Amino acid sequence: MDNCFFGLLRSYLRVDNVSVRICDTRIFHIFGNNYLYREFQVKENTYEELKYKGFKFSSDWSLAHNQSDSVSQYLDVVFTAKDTVIIDDKPAN
């Protein structure tokens, strides 16, 4: 992308047979603007809740490198914060 960037930072926590939590931070910036957009989101469910929703736990999933992507769509959003961050280009004193 020549005129902007988008970044995703994901923190993924899995406690076997207990719960799964994902904390995502997304950042978007258009070059030339003095601000960027930031979204922070937390998703979480217990293993029992995920089973009830139809998620299939398997050894293939447990060993997969992209397991957070496959379970993410089943997790409930428990917190979201969106904000605009002003970028101050003045040097600090």
Image (tube, grey):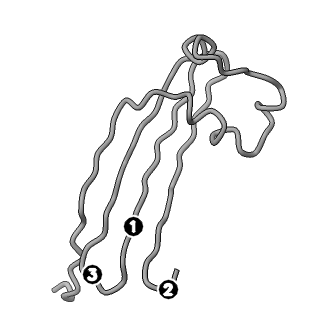
Above or below for 33 versus 36:
below
Position of the C terminus, as image quadrant, is: bottom left
Name the residue that disc number 1 marks.
28
Q: Of 57 and 91, which appears nearest the observer?
A: 57
Determine the residue positioned at 39% across, 67% down: 28
Q: Residues within 10 Å of mark 3 (few under 14, many from 20)?
A: few
Q: Look at 56% across and 21% down and name the residue there.
A: 19
Residue drawn 23% across the image and 86% down it: 89
Mark 1–mark 3 distance (CA, rounded to whole Å): 11 Å
In the foreground, 5 or 86? 5
Q: Of helix, strand and loop, which one carries label 3?
A: loop
Q: Which residue is mark 2?
A: 2
Q: Which residue is mark 3?
A: 33
Question: What residue type is disc 2 on?
Answer: Asp
Q: Position of residue 85 (x, y in %)?
A: 24, 66
Total numbered labels? 3
Q: Is residue 57 above or below residue 28?
A: above
- Decide which of tag 1 and tag 2 comes sooner along the chain: 2
What is the secondary structure assignment of the residue under circle 2?
A: loop
Residue 55 in the image: above or below residue 5: above
The residue type indicated by label 3 comes to Asn
Query: Residue 62 location, x and y as percent?
Result: 77, 31
Label 1's element?
strand
Q: Amino acid at mark 1?
A: Phe
12 over 27 or under it: above or below: above
